[in-house]
Amino acid sequence: MPAALQETRRATRLLAGACRTGLLGCLAALALMVFVMAMSPSVAPASTVQVKLSSTNLGKILTFSGFTLYRFTRDTKNNDVCVKISGCAMVWTPLITSGTPTAGAGVKSSLLSTIGIRGGRRQVVYAGRPLYRYVFDNRGATSYVGASQFGGNWYALNASGGVVR
């Protein structure tokens, strides 16, 4: 089953659950789902993903297309836990590629790899940690570093794969 169809079915189940709480809950969930889908990057994987090291107010951190890349503290080495938590991957989108990720200046190519996740997709991993983007982020923003959602924290990474808080 295509990944986009799986995500749509999962979102529909979430909406149905919210609608059981009443009209207000249903409308709120529907509005949030429409907003998230409008703000989400395309579900089609990038054929080439280049992870870069960018200077920010927190120091040098990993980025993709100018957006901060995050790691989830509930993930284990080479294992994406977020995709198994209802709604998580809609807000914290896995960095997906259909090719081999490449390292920009200052990024260690030996630490870049991919793992398989739901729907046959390949998620980019750095130092064994799955990488994500925050759906509401702006290019160059770091205000969500340290956010606490879905039972864990979301941190940026430095060139050695260490946590940036």
Image: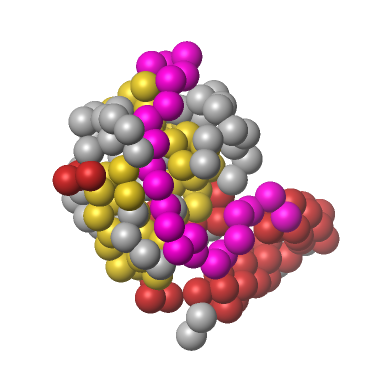
Residue 50 belongs to the span the image colors magenta:
yes
Q: Quadrant of residue 8?
A: bottom right
Task: Please identify the quadrant where the C terminus is shown.
Answer: top left
Q: Which residue sits furthest bottom?
A: 1
- Horizontal side of 107 relative to 132 (left or right) equals left
* 116 to 90, vertically: above or below: below
Q: Position of residue 81 (x, y in %)?
A: 33, 55
Quick one: 133 or 113, which is closer to the camera?
Answer: 113
Residue at point 61% right, 67% down? 11
Q: Is residue 28 magenta?
A: no
Along the line of sight, which residue is nearer the eye, 23 or 74? Answer: 74
Q: Position of residue 64 (x, y in %)?
A: 46, 42
Q: How is the image coloured?
A: secondary structure
Q: Which residue is rendered at x = 73% and y = 65% of the image?
A: 19
Residue 152 in view: no
Name above or below for residue 69 compared with residue 41: above
Magenta range: 38-59
User: Residue sitting at 45 percent across and 63 percent down?
Assistant: 47
Q: Position of residue 125 (x, y in %)?
A: 29, 51
Looking at the picture, does residue 12 appear above or below residue 145? below
Position in image of residue 90 (x %, y %): 56, 56
